Image: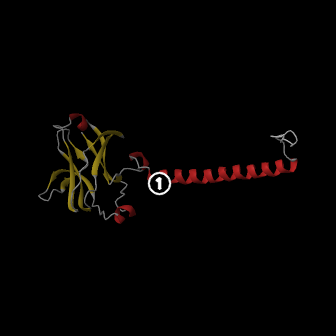
């Protein structure tokens, strides 16, 4: 740089500073507003995708009429508990009271479940999770009854005296609850 040319001092015209500050403020406010909108939409989406827990709804609250199930081609029958299975593997001799040494069957009656749709049951005792059954799926569309068994031989701790709820999950969403007690 030549000595005869003026050098910048780093200061600007006060009018330029006011305009620049106003632009910065507008940009910062726009970023805050857009960020808040995006964050609230993301939180809303997360809330919509949060699985319902057993405590989110009363026992016996049937979710089988959920529009999402119908859109997925899922039609669920009644979810029941009983002492036996018939020749079509449907739960029979329905009851809500069992002895500690009884086989307890819970199942969906006459349902239509598309191929590769996972189904499992979560068992609660006195509102505490006892266990989840293994997930079952069919490689083909399935029409019929789906059942799960709880027995003293397999899991003696499951059949202690108390109040139980079995909640069936279809495609990772709660579908129905059946309540029963063990003496």
From the top left corner, tell me how far across and down residue 43 is, in percent.
53, 50
Classify residue 80 by image quadrant: bottom left
119 relative position to 21: left or right: left
Residue at position x 68%, y 53% in the image? 30
177 relative position to 9: left or right: left
In the rendered image of this protein, does residue 90 appear above or below residue 183?
Answer: below
Residue at position x 73%, y 53% in the image? 26
From the top left corner, tell me how far across and down residue 59 is, in percent.
36, 50
Residue at position x 13%, y 57% in the image? 86
In the rendered image of this protein, does residue 67 appear above or below residue 99?
Answer: below
Residue tagged 1:
48
From the top left corner, tell me how far across and down residue 182 is, in percent.
25, 41
Secondary element under disc 1, as helix, strand or loop, is helix
- Give the camera-side residue of 158 and 70: 70
Total label count? Answer: 1
In the rendered image of this protein, does residue 136 appear above or below residue 154?
Answer: below
């Amino acid at each position: 740089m030549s000595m005869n040319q003026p050098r910048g001092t780093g200061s600007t015209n006060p009018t330029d500073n006011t305009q620049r500050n106003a632009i910065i403020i507008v940009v910062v406010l726009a970023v805050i507003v857009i960020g808040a909108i995006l964050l609230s939409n993301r939180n809303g989406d997360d809330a919509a995708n949060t699985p319902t827990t057993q405590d989110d709804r009363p026992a016996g609250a049937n979710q089988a009429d959920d529009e999402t199930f119908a859109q997925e081609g899922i039609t669920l029958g009644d979810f029941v508990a009983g002492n036996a299975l018939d020749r079509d593997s449907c739960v029979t001799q329905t009851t809500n009271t069992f002895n500690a040494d009884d086989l307890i069957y819970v199942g969906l009656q006459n349902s239509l479940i598309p191929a590769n749709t996972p189904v499992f049951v979560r068992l609660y005792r006195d509102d505490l999770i006892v266990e989840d059954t293994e997930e079952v799926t069919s490689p083909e569309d399935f029409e019929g009854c789906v059942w799960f068994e709880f027995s003293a031989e397999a899991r003696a701790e499951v059949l202690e005296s108390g109040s139980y709820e079995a909640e069936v999950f279809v495609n990772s969403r709660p579908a129905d609850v059946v309540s029963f007690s063990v003496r």
